[in-house]
Amino acid sequence: MDLYQELILEHYKRPVRAGLREPFEAEVRHVNPTCGDEVTLRVHVAGRGGDAVVEDVSYDAMGCSISVASASILAEEITGGSVTHARETYEAMHSMLTSKGEDPGDEEKIGDGVALAGVAKYPARIKCALLSWMAFSDALHQAEGAQQ
């Protein structure tokens, strides 16, 4: 088993920052109708604008190993960073996962997310890997709107 497969399984078996916590500014629930994967994600942001800090990303994920591992990776990579960093990380993950395997991912930007690079070659699994990232993007947008 290669390192990336082991990393995905580790995040699946021991998800980072799992469980829904308070406080939070936004909560969203996304479902992948193709396979039934589900994620409920909360985001807690302190401050305003790009310098605001994503103080917490908490989630409850049910589904395949790719879906749960992706949520765990998201929480690990995003929590504690700026909103600007979160957006850059989201864009890098989205680009890698939708590249059909042509973008190997940048470990500097997405950390353990590079373990999911191979998913880009399997269209049916891309939605699994993107589910929590799309939920995070929606929650971040809602959180910013709530602070206005």
Image (spheres, grey):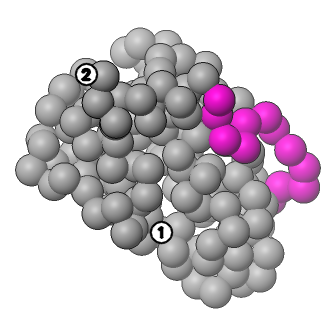
Q: Is residue 12 magenta?
A: no
Q: Earlier in the sequence, mark 2 or mark 1?
A: 1
Find residue 33 and report its image quarter.
top left
Q: Amino acid at mark 1?
A: Arg
The residue at the point 47 percent across, 17 percent down is 64
Image coordinates for residue 6, horizontal then vertical, percent: 41, 29
* Placement of 146 over or under 135, stated as above or below: below
Which quadrant would the C terminus be assigned to in this image?
bottom right
Q: Which residue is mark 1?
A: 87
Seen in the image, is 93 located left or right of residue 141?
left
Seen in the image, is 138 located left or right of residue 101?
right
Q: Which residue is mark 2?
A: 124
Q: Secondary structure beneath disc 2?
A: helix
Q: Is residue 138 shown to the viewer in this render? A: no
* Placement of 34 over or under 130, stated as above or below: above
Which quadrant would the N terminus be assigned to in this image?
top left
